[in-house]
Image (tube, coloured by chain):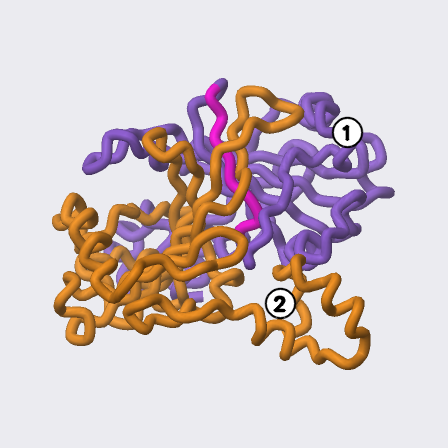
Chain colours: A orange, B purple
Amino acid sequence: MFLLIFFSKRFLPLVSLAGGFVLASQVWAADKPPPAPNGIERPEGYQDWRPIGVSHRSDKNSLRIIVGNDIAVQAARAGKTNPWPDGTILGKLVWEDRVHENWAAATVPGKLVHTEFMIRDARKYAGTKGWGFARWLGDEQKPYGKDATFANECAECHTAAKDTDHVFTRPVSLP
Amino acid sequence: MFLLIFFSKRFLPLVSLAGGFVLASQVWAADKPPPAPNGIERPEGYQDWRPIGVSHRSDKNSLRIIVGNDIAVQAARAGKTNPWPDGTILGKLVWEDRVHENWAAATVPGKLVHTEFMIRDARKYAGTKGWGFARWLGDEQKPYGKDATFANECAECHTAAKDTDHVFTRPVSLP
């Protein structure tokens, strides 16, 4: 719990002001964003998940790390990803492109665009191709979508990856 | 141990042929690459390290995930990275650019170019700016460099990042 608050740098001044009166766990709890309009909560501890992919999109000028929970990582390493097993959660962490100060040919993360997640539950999310979709915007982690129908937009776009269980990511292997 | 062998897909046929006669641990041991010419061993378990950065290089046409061991991740989250603490290990996992089959504007990992590591030990590696450098090429993970002097080439290039302890990566924060 203690380590986790290092992620939420914008709360550090608050912690300093409040001194011993604020417990680390409360700060972390305050940091949890509201659920997405379809009721999905942002997965806890996603900051500690392991990478299974990476990408750059020239149509969005952004860099992405794809991480997975333990079930996802095991499935990826076993090559059992079509379909992914129930319980899989994939996270995509997206940053604006920025030119590296010391290396002009390197594109590195700028501002956080969003974190987004796909949660596999074939029955619960049967209406959106077996996946629960949710996204939180920017450093504020504001939930994306006006109402629960936003997830149709996600599912629609992922139709392009229907041959790979609606997942764009091809897990990397690391020898 | 069992899960780890899923990384080494090229050994799976061998495992199948040998059947019960080969223990998983032996396969994994066989999978460990030789040390770099300066004696540095590839860090064990780097596949399970957490991400602290990502980049794309247009001068090398490659995508990179930067991962760190526990000491590195703690330092990154605490903002204590100039200098990074002794014991830090940073890993850079590099893949050739590939166009995504289902999304032309997305660049995703192709062939593994190399894994490379920076190991912080200010005294031991005083000759190369406090960092031990090593790199293993491709899926074969062949050690890079003809002799121990290869590390001078690494350190020389990292001079461009001398204001940030010779590390190019600026750790991302995840709220």
The chain holding disc 2 is A
Q: Give the residue at x 61% y 25%.
A: B145
Which residue does the numbered mark 1 point to in the structure image?
B162
Tell me: residue B96, above or below residue A115: above
Q: In the displayed structure, would residue A156 be above or below residue B35? A: below
Magenta extent: B51-58
**Measured from the top left, where is residue B92 in percent x and y?**
55, 40
The answer to whether residue B133 is seen in the rendering is: yes
- Tell me which residue sits at (20%, 49%) in the image: A158
Q: Is residue B150 magenta?
A: no
Residue depicted at 38% across the width and 46% down the height: A53
Q: Which residue is mark 2?
A: A4
Q: Nearer the viewer, residue A116 or A18?
A: A18
| Dominant SS type (magenta) | strand
Q: Is residue B55 magenta?
A: yes
Q: Is residue A29 left or right of residue B20?
A: right
Using the rendered view, name the quadrant where residue B163 is placed.
top right
Depth order, front residue of A140/A121: A140
- Tell whether A48 sits left or right of A66: right
Q: Tell whether B91 sits left or right of A69.
A: right
Rendering coords of residue B94 (x, y %)? 47, 35
Residue appearing at x 34%, y 36% in the figure? B108
- Of A133 and A82, which appears nearest the observer? A133
